[in-house]
Image (cartoon, grey):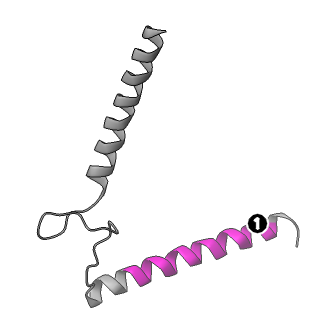
Amino acid sequence: MKKFTLALTALTALGGIALAAGSATAAPMSVNGLQSESGITQVRMDRSERMMMKKRMMRKQMMKRRMMKKRMMNRGM
């Protein structure tokens, strides 16, 4: 019984350490070194970045349309 309890506590401790390390590295840090509560920091985008995002989205939509069109043609419609 003692071995089982010891193994269970060791497993719980290792899982907690792994979980804490994963969450600590994933969240961005704010300016003063404290983590924000939401975990998301807002950054202002300039015009060129916005245009790049827009182009990327349009390209994804175009590829999606092309895939759907091929799928419809292969079905004989």
For the point 76% across and 66% down, the residue is 71
Q: Position of residue 8 (x, y in %)?
A: 44, 21
For the point 50% across and 77% down, the residue is 59
Q: Nearer the viewer, residue 36 or 9?
A: 9
Range drawn in magenta: 53-73
Tell whether 44 sits left or right of 71: left
Residue 66 figure quarter: bottom right
Is residue 6 within the magenta segment?
no
Q: Which residue is mark 1?
A: 71
Q: State the SS at label 1.
A: helix
For the point 23% across and 63% down, the residue is 35
Q: Position of residue 24 (x, y in %)?
A: 27, 50
Q: What amino acid does circle 1 point to?
A: Arg
Q: Is residue 76 above or below residue 5?
A: below
Q: Is residue 53 above or below residue 23?
A: below
In this rendering, the count of numbered labels is 1
Residue sitting at the far right: 76
Q: Nearer the viewer, residue 72 or 36?
A: 36
Q: Position of residue 50 (x, y in %)?
A: 34, 85
Residue sitting at the far front: 1
